Amino acid sequence: MVRRNKPKQLSGAELERFLQAAEGLHRSIVDPLISPQCDHYRSMQTLHEALLQTVREVTGKEVAFIRWNSTGPAKMS
């Protein structure tokens, strides 16, 4: 049986699929308009921070689908 070394990073196509999936998850987290005082909102914020951190670690740069302004993150069209 031949063992091959697995790549140490995602290929271009894999990275693009990862970013598309991350953007979809980002939108599903930020689209619901719920009260910031509820448990669901706080849990979703925790998940969102983990998502953004993971995308930064995998890509080595800020996520392209987030645009910051004076009020916080804004959705890209």
Image (tube, helix red, strand yellow):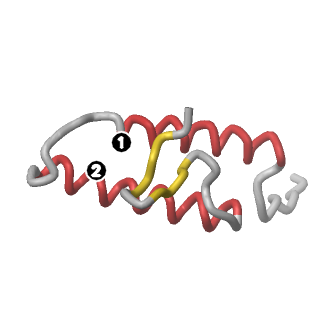
Q: Callout 1, which amino acid?
A: Ile
Question: What distance separates the C-alpha of mark 1 from that of mark 2?
Answer: 6 Å
Tag count in the figure? Answer: 2
User: Label 2's element?
Assistant: helix
Image spot of residue 59 (x, y percent): 70, 60
Image spot of residue 75 (x, y percent): 48, 41
x 39%, y 35%: residue: 28
Image spot of residue 19 (x, y percent): 64, 44
- Marks 1/2 in contact by CB < 8 Å: the verdict is yes
Work out which residue is located at the far front of the displayed protein and give it: 70
Rendered-image quadrant of the C terminus: top right
Image spot of residue 37 (x, y percent): 9, 54
User: Label 1's element?
Assistant: helix
Q: Is residue 4 left or right of residue 59?
A: right
Q: Callout 2, which amino acid?
A: Met
Q: Is residue 23 left or right of residue 70?
A: right
Q: Is residue 51 left or right of residue 45?
A: right
Q: Earlier in the sequence, mark 1 or mark 2?
A: 1
According to the image, label 2 marks what residue? 44
According to the image, label 1 marks what residue? 29
Q: Residues within 10 Å of mark 1 (few under 14, many from 20)?
A: some
Q: Is the residue 14 above or below the residue 8 in the image?
A: above
User: Of residues 17 and 4, which is closer to you in this image?
Assistant: 17
x 62%, y 62%: residue: 62
Q: Residue 14 is drawn in which quadrant?
A: top right
Q: Is residue 14 left or right of residue 34?
A: right
Q: Residues within 10 Å of mark 2 (few under 14, many from 20)?
A: some
